[in-house]
Image (spheres, rainbow, N blue to C red):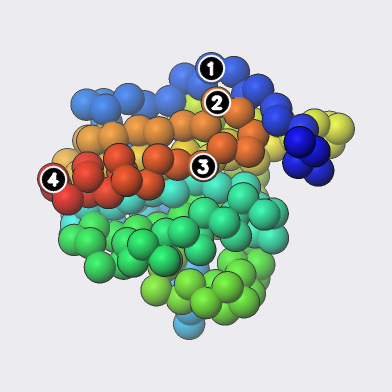
Amino acid sequence: MNLGFDIVELGDADHPEAGETAPDFTRPLVNDEYWEDASLSALTDEEPVVLVFYPMDGDFPATYIWQEIDDREWVDYDARVVGLSISTPYEHSRFLEEWGVEDYELFSDPQNGVAESYGISHDLDGMNGIAEPRPAVFVIDEERTVREAWVATEWPEFPPYSDIEATIERL
């Protein structure tokens, strides 16, 4: 079968595992109305966080991941679901509106520093010096402890949504 793209093995990642503390960071957090700097620790002080790393806005995995999360109504869980990619706040605003996922918020990390601190940075083939996060999901409790970590080992690969939902329900 010709999928129109190659499957790329991403190899191992040195990411936080369940039971470890999620690295803190501060970046612009974009919603459907505005954006402002926010830290992960400030979010987890309020409630658990589901942190969804994804490729840049407009890439088909980004669209698929957020449509699936929206269709599964993760906004109804007792956790704050936020995304993170290398896209700018302007691109995030357009993405939220265009795909109708305004119930979620997206961190902007154009330099990919957060993905680097999480050990999930992926160099884009053929683009010297350009990296993005590999797809990953971290379920993080109010103590900033990782309760579940899923990180893609190939591209494209999508999260095990049902497994992640089970972890969110146990929070």
Q: Nearer the viewer, mark 2 or mark 1?
A: 2
**Res. 24 in view:** no
Q: CA distance from mark 3 to mark 4?
A: 22 Å
SS of the residue at dot 1? loop
The residue under the point 64% across, 34% down is 155
Q: CA distance from mark 2 to mark 1?
A: 7 Å
Marks 3 and 2 sit apart, C-alpha to C-alpha, by 10 Å
**Mark closer to the chain start, 3 or 4:** 3
Q: Amino acid at mark 3?
A: Phe
Q: Which sits in the foreground, 95 or 33?
A: 95
CA gap between label 1 and label 4 equals 28 Å
From what the image shows, is residue 54 above or below residue 133? below
- Proximity of marks 3 and 2: CB atoms separated by less than 8 Å: no
* Residue furthest to the bottom: 33
Q: State the mark number for residue 170.
A: 4
Residue type indicated by callout 2:
Thr
Dot 3 or dot 1, earlier in sequence: 1
Specify the label residue 12 is tagged with: 1
Mark carried by residue 153: 2
- Depth check, mark 3 against mark 1: the one in front is 3
- Asked if the residue under mark 4 is in contact with the one under mark 1, i.e. CB atoms within 8 Å, the reply is no
Viewer-nearest of labels 1 and 4?
4
- The earlier-in-sequence mark between 2 and 4 is 2
In the image, 21 versus 74, the foreground residue is: 74
Amino acid type of the residue tagged 4 in the rendering: Arg
- The relative height of residue 54 versus residue 87 in the rendered view (above or below) is above
Q: Secondary structure at mark 2?
A: loop
User: What's the residue at 63%, 38% (across, down)?
Assistant: 156
Q: Name the residue type under label 1.
A: Asp
Question: Pointer 3: what residue?
Answer: 158
